[in-house]
Image (cartoon, rainbow, N blue to C red):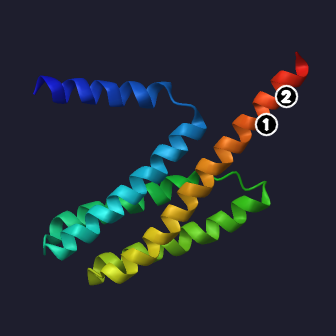
């Protein structure tokens, strides 16, 4: 139990000290994790666990939807993608369909990887500007 409490404290500290960009990446990682957990649960015929994992995935998608800044064009495109993913997750949950989860997982991984790459590029850009300013 002690090590579990230590891990939970570490996890909580990571969340509390993360930048907004890092929090977004954590959410994408969580989305991927929960979709994969749902797939495994469906394979194992643990439908309540699959339901819970899909609902957690839907919650993450909803969080992405409500935090979009719609003054940017990219936000409108993301809103459409998130809406589609959410509808497909609902359908996957109703049907307990791994193929639909595979489709949504592909989107989730692509969005996560794109976000991680954007974070790297932004950091490189900041480092270049700091070097130039010196």
Rendered residue at 27%/71% (across/down): 39
Q: Position of residue 90 (x, y in %)?
A: 38, 75
Which residue is the site of mark 1? 125
The reply to whether residue 102 is visible in this rendering is yes
The reply, left or right, for residue 98 in relation to residue 41 is right
Mark 1 packing: few (<14 Cα in 10 Å), some, or many (20+)?
A: few
Q: Residue at the spot x=34%, y=78% of the render?
A: 92
Horizontal arrangement in the rendering, residue 5 relative to residue 80 (left or right): left
Q: Residue at x 64, y 53 (%)?
A: 68
Q: Looking at the figure, which quarter contains the C terminus?
A: top right
- Disc number placed over residue 129 in the picture, else none: 2
Describe residue 14's horizontal placement relative to residue 37 as left or right.
right
Q: CA distance from mark 2 to mark 1?
A: 6 Å
Task: Look at the numbered discs 2 and 1 and tell me whether their residues touch, using CB distance below 8 Å.
Answer: yes
Residue 65 appears in the rendering? no
**Which residue is pictured at 49% across the width and 63% down the height?**
108
Q: Is residue 21 above or below residue 105?
A: above
């Amino acid at each position: 139990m002690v090590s579990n409490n230590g891990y939970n404290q570490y996890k909580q500290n990571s969340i509390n000290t993360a930048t907004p960009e890092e929090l977004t990446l954590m959410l994408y990682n969580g989305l991927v994790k929960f979709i994969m957990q749902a797939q495994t649960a469906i394979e194992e015929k643990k439908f309540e666990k699959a339901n819970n994992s899909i609902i957690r995935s839907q919650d993450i998608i909803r969080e992405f939807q409500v935090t979009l800044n719609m003054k940017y064009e990219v936000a409108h495109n993301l809103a459409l993608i998130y809406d589609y993913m959410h509808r497909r997750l609902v359908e996957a949950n109703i049907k307990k369909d791994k193929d639909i989860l595979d489709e949504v997982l592909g989107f989730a991984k692509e969005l996560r990887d794109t976000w991680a790459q954007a974070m790297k590029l932004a950091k490189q850009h900041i480092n270049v500007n700091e070097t130039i300013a010196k």
